[in-house]
Image: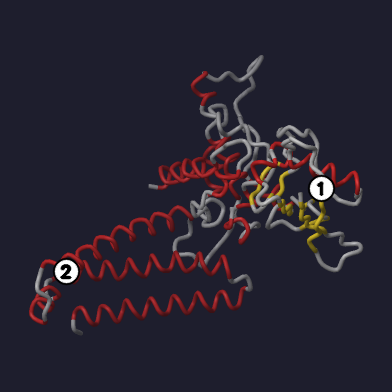
Amino acid sequence: MVSSVTNLGRSGVFDWLIQRVTAYVLALYTLFLLGFMVFSDVNYETWTALFSQTWFRIFTLLALLSIGAHAWVGLWTVTTDYIKAMAPRFLVQALCGLTMFVYVIWGIQILWGL
Amino acid sequence: MLVSLYRYNPETDNAPYMQDVEVEIPEGKDLMVLDVLNLIKERDPSMAYRRSCREGVCGSDGMNMNGTNGLACITPMSQVVKKDKLVLRPLPGLPVIRDLVVDMSLFYKQYEKVMPYLVNDTPAPAIERLQTPEDREKLDGLYECILCACCSTACPSFWWNPDKFIGPSGLLQAYRFLADSRDTAQAERLSNLDDPFSVFRCRGIMNCVSVCPKGLNPTKAIGHIRNLLLQRAT
């Protein structure tokens, strides 16, 4: 058993499952948006109409949170592979965490027009 | 034929270097790579490599031949030699002791972690612990591993984290005991593996499968371990 405190969950299987589930959410969201762009006329009216619906805001927020979790698991793996010294590794991980946090909060602000 | 050899003797060399040797191959013969090395050693006894059974059973002569890991004793020249040239290097990712001999301590440490032995707390029967032929069949493709380290040293995840990621060889062995009907320590074994490194550092690159000289499939075994962990945790 290797101990680790910087990964998303405390267990390997949790991280693995989160990454798979969020991948499905992101794929669905991407397909939906692509479909929307292909099959409907994208202009200010249709775009605001889409984003004014609560279900789509929830779907977008879910996608945003999924990106955060998915990227955290992925980038954590990359940093533990390639950055061997503790200080720079922790710094990069903290920067990644901060960036994701900012994007999620910012996304909420945009979605609900707060 | 030109053979390029990785040479390093820590007592005399500051750094490893490649030595080119011209080897006369007997006409019409498809020698094994180990035979070529033996021919070289006859001329230069300082050349160091491990070998023992010379028939792919002991797993001593794992090395990197023209970029691919394998056992020198069962790899014919016709399979690896390209443009009449053979490049021999030690297994990648492990510290070199001398020439083609690597320090396998980390590899064995990972092997030790998976408790590669049967654990059974129930009273021992008079003769032996029996297994149905079906249960015994589950161990096929797992027990044959000879610990040559060709797979683990071909695995990028093992290169980056050899101290944390158990590696394909160790995980194949881990599953060999998880799948054994006579073992009673499955819960403990799984608990020892449920961290982000031991099993989950496998990214499914499958170098292990393509180099295994015994034709085993560690990636599949790792998938089974992952499923067991998932079943237990959801």
Element marked by disc 1: loop
Q: Nearer the viewer, residue B7 or B31?
A: B31
Q: Residues within 10 Å of mark 1 (few under 14, many from 20)?
A: few
Q: Are marks 1 and 2 in contact (CB under 8 Å)?
A: no
Disc 2 residue type (three-letter):
Phe
Q: Residue at x 34, y 68 (%)?
A: A67
Residue for point 38% across, 66% down: A69
Counting from the top left corner in percent of width and height, residue B97 is at: 82, 56
In the picture shown, does residue A104 fall above or below B174?
Answer: below
Say which quarter of the image contains residue A45: bottom left
Q: Which mark is residue B73?
A: none
Judge the density around disc 2: few (<14), some (14-19), many (≥20) Cα neighbours within 10 Å.
some
The chain ID associated with circle 2 is A
Give the residue at mark 1: B23
Label 1 and label 2: CA atoms lie apart by 71 Å
Q: Which mark is residue A56?
A: 2
Residue that appears at 56% across and 52% down: B198
Q: Is residue A67 above or below residue B114?
A: below
- The answer to whether residue B37 is left or right of residue A21 is right
